[in-house]
Image: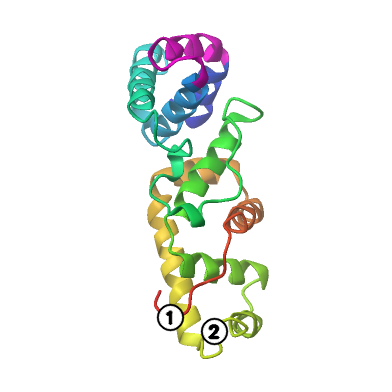
Amino acid sequence: MTPAELADFYNRKKADMRRFAARYCGDNAADDAVQESFVRLLPHCDKIDGAAPAGYVFAALKTASIDAVRQRGRRRETLMDEVPEDEKPRRLPGGLLRGHLLVQACRVILQQAVARLSANQRGALKLWLATEGHMGQALTILRETEPDATPAVYAGRLHQAKERLREELRDYRELFDQLLPATTFRKLLNEIVCEFPGQPEGGGS
């Protein structure tokens, strides 16, 4: 299956899938389980037989639903569990089954990737986006909080941020290439980076 075909299957079967998930994790967690199973399947959708995808998809949904039960009692932001509380984004994305499933999936995937950057890496990425890649302007802003910041420090953080994002998004490249032109991707990335509170920390990377 292609990502579009997988999304179409989810949209056609979303009511059945929600009922199925609710048997395992309850009604309140069912939407999250459906969303999580979709995100997990995306990088492997080429392995799903498009003529008979139900078995593969519902098996993944069962796993995600059971995982939701195991995670009950933990923080609700399961996509961001590894991120310190003060670095969580101010708002989480809406359910994947509302609006355009694939575009929403791209947002969730990208938000997870950005969350795995260090605060300094996110800060450098935010400056790069805000200044449209202008080194001088980025340094001027950075030096308001880090007077001793050098071009090498900023460039190093930015390089690390870009390399980490490439690694995190490697399995989803086809999906992003299909759905998001470069300008749209950059706009979405900027929006997500700006959701994270706080300024870049001084020193280190």
Q: Which mark is residue 146?
A: 2
Q: Residues within 10 Å of mark 1 (few under 14, many from 20)?
A: few
User: What amino acid is found at the position of numbered circle 1 in the picture?
Assistant: Gly
Helix or strand or loop: what does disc 1 sit on?
loop
* C-alpha separation, residue under disc 2 versus residue under disc 1: 8 Å
Q: Position of residue 27 (x, y in %)?
A: 50, 15
User: What amino acid is found at the position of numbered circle 2 in the picture?
Assistant: Glu
Q: Quadrant of the N terminus?
A: top left
Residue placed at 39% from the left, 31% from the top?
73
Q: Position of residue 155 (x, y in %)?
A: 48, 79
Helix or strand or loop: what does disc 2 sit on?
loop
Compared to residue 159, the image places residue 26 above or below, namely above
Residue placed at 45% from the left, 24% from the top?
33
Residue placed at 54% from the left, 69% from the top?
123
Compared to residue 165, the image places residue 129 above or below, namely below
Left or right: 92 with respect to 166?
right
Assess whether residue 102 is covered by the magenta stretch: no
Q: Position of residue 128 (x, y in %)?
A: 59, 71
Q: Which residue is label 1 attached to?
A: 203
**Labels 2 & 1 near each other (Cβ < 8 A):** yes
Give the image's coloring scheme. Answer: rainbow
Compared to residue 160, the image places residue 175 above or below, namely above
Left or right: 71 with respect to 26?
left
Q: Quadrant of the C terminus?
A: bottom left
